[in-house]
């Protein structure tokens, strides 16, 4: 099904707000950026915002199966009849591919497809420029924050270097586009 932003917001709120309030603050801030960007994105605008609302539902205790949140979230969404496109955007968000290798679930991601579009880049951008509590962060500062929060031995940190090139590329392409539509200073 196509997921309307308002429905996505309510759904994500029910899964995350009480269980993981700090994560919920992050999601709210990511989705607010996606909403602003979505107004300039044309037909994918609403999809970008809806996906931003649900991008971290895999952290919710009630959705967790493998413990790898992009995969658990994507499978949960698909099981609830959300479109494959949204599920795939969630499955691969913010260089989840590199994290999946470190976590040991890389082969599971073949259920989904990384569409490598501007919409995908912008989702990554919104997520990777928003801190864990919803604070606005420069991309490089966010990467430093992730490294410090998880520590050197965690799979997320180990995956940072492997995925850094595609993360940075997505952010640079997003910045170019944001500049071209006059949003560079707003998100
Ligand atoms: Fe996120």
Image (cartoon, grey):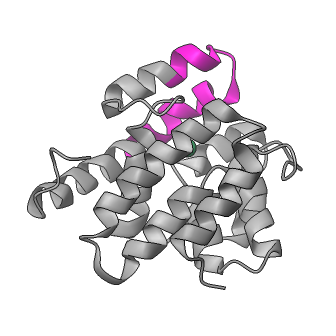
Residue at horizontal 63%, vertical 19%? 150
Q: Where is residue 141 in the image (x, y as percent from the top left)?
A: 36, 23
Residue at horizontal 62%, vertical 14%? 152
Residue at horizontal 62%, vertical 70%? 7
Query: Residue 164 lies in magenta, yes or no?
Result: yes
**Residue 144 vertical position relative to residue 9 in the rendered view, above or below:** above
Q: Position of residue 102 (x, y in %)?
A: 70, 37
Q: Where is residue 164 in the image (x, y as percent from the top left)?
A: 43, 38
Query: Residue 117 lies in magenta, yes or no?
Result: no
Asked if residue 113 shows in the view, the reply is no
Direction from residue 45 to residue 102 in the image, left or right: right
Residue at horizontal 23%, vertical 70%? 40
Q: In which quarter of the image is ligand 1?
A: top right
Direction from residue 177 to residue 102 in the image, left or right: right
Q: In which quarter of the image is residue 23?
A: top right
Asked whether 149 or 168 is in front, the reply is 149
Q: In which quarter of the image is residue 60?
A: top right
Direction from residue 63 to residue 140 in the image, left or right: left
The quarter in which the N terminus is drawn is bottom right
**Residue 5 vertical position relative to residue 161 in the rendered view, above or below:** below
Asked if residue 9 shows in the view, the reply is yes
Asked whether 166 or 180 is in front, the reply is 180
Q: Position of residue 111 (x, y in %)?
A: 74, 71
Question: How many callouts does the rendering have?
Answer: 0
Direction from residue 160 to residue 166 in the image, left or right: left
Q: What stretch is highlighted in magenta?
A: 146-165
Magenta: main secondary structure = helix
């Amino acid at each position: 099904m196509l997921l309307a932003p308002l429905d996505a917001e309510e759904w994500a709120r029910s899964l995350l707000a009480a269980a993981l309030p700090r994560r919920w603050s992050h999601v709210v801030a990511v989705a607010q950026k996606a909403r602003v960007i979505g107004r300039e994105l044309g037909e994918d605008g609403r999809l970008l915002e809806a996906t931003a609302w649900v991008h971290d539902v895999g952290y919710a205790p009630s959705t967790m199966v493998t413990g790898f949140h992009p995969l658990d979230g994507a499978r949960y969404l698909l099981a609830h009849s959300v479109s494959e496109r949204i599920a795939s955007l969630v499955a691969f968000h913010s260089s989840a591919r590199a994290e999946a290798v470190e976590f040991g679930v890389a082969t599971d991601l073949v259920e989904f497809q990384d569409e490598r579009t501007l919409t995908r880049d912008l989702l990554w951008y919104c997520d990777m420029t928003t801190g864990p509590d919803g604070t606005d962060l420069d991309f490089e500062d966010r990467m430093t924050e992730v490294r410090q929060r998880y520590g050197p031995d965690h799979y997320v940190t180990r995956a940072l270097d492997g995925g850094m090139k595609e993360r940075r590329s997505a952010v640079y392409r997003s910045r170019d586009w944001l500049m071209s539509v006059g949003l560079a200073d707003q998100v």
